[in-house]
Amino acid sequence: MRPGLRIGLLGPLTVNGRPGAVVPAQSQLIVALAVSQDGLSGGQLRTLLGSDASHPRPAGSFRQLIARTRRALDRTADGSQWIEHVGHGRYRLHPHVWVDWREFEAAAAAGIRLADAGLLADALDLVHGQPFADCYYWWLEPALIESVTARIVTAAERLAELRLASGDPVGAVRAARIGLVADAAAERLWRLVMRGEHAAGNLAGVRGAWERCQGVVAEIAADGKPEPVTAAIYAELLARRT
């Protein structure tokens, strides 16, 4: 049986679990199709795959790229192409392609709606770093990356809160730290790490989280300081007996 096709975007780009599995131009083509739900026209893809919006990839070079990428990805179990031509000059990934971001979206949305820690944990298990970590494409909008990152942080926050409420501070810390892998500056997650470490009786962990939070925030905040609420929670936890 032929293997499936798995695309990882929640961290360094992977194809079937391997970074660098295809050449850079093929990676860019795969990412462009993976972030598009409805596919893209050949003209749109040629523009995205060019050096900038004014310099699209030549038509002949684009056709060669499609052919070479298809060969690199092999075929589906029934012999279909993983990159489909769906008519009218449009291309899309085969419906059976597994994209971690799409799986994350479904599990996280259901987990938040149902307050289901299992679904949220399944979603966060898919996160392996900053989204699109090595995808330096001129067309990849910062707003998209920020949106994906924000959803990871929200899922991590909700799971950490559920873990704390159920008396699992270690699980709460683990959940918050997964979110921090995606966005190290998310102070609401640092607050949950400190709360979880305190609930676990680990004051050294509280101090360590505060110091790490300070270090990260110092590099990005206008005044170089964490938010007042973060500082207040740190002071409160240190003053409170475990």
Image (tube, grey):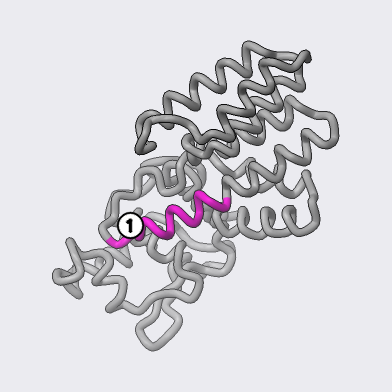
Vertical relation: 47 (above or below) 177? below
Q: Residue at x 35, y 38 (%)?
A: 222
- The quadrant holding residue 204 is top right
Q: For the residue labelled by badge 1, is the local secondary structure a helix, a strand or a loop?
A: helix
Residue segment shown in magenta:
139-151
Vertical relation: 69 (above or below) 53? above
Residue 192 part of the magenta-drawn span: no
Vertical relation: 113 (above or below) 133? below
Question: Where residue 13 sits: x, y (%)?
Answer: 42, 46
- The quadrant holding residue 107 is bottom right
Secondary structure character of the magenta stretch overall = helix
Question: Where residue 217 sits: x, y (%)?
Answer: 43, 32
Which quarter shows the C terminus?
Answer: top right
Q: Residue at x 45, y 69 (%)?
A: 36
Which quarter shows the N terminus?
Answer: bottom right
> Hey, what amino acid is under mark 1?
Gln
Question: Where residue 125 sits: x, y (%)?
Answer: 64, 41
Judge from the rendering whether residue 146 lies leftward or rightward of residue 117; answer left or right. Answer: left
Residue with the most extreme top position: 204
Vertical relation: 74 (above or below) 208? below
Q: Which residue is mark 1?
A: 28
Question: Where residue 216 sits: x, y (%)?
Answer: 43, 29
- Label 1: few (<14), some (14–19) or many (≥20) C-alpha neighbours in 10 Å: many
Q: Residue at x 56, y 42 (%)?
A: 127
Q: Nearer the viewer, residue 200 or 42?
A: 200
Residue 144 part of the magenta-drawn span: yes
Residue with the most extreme bottom position: 88
Q: Nearer the viewer, residue 236 or 18?
A: 236
Judge from the rendering whether residue 228 lies leftward or rightward of residue 241; answer left or right. Answer: left
Q: Residue at x 71, y 32 (%)?
A: 172
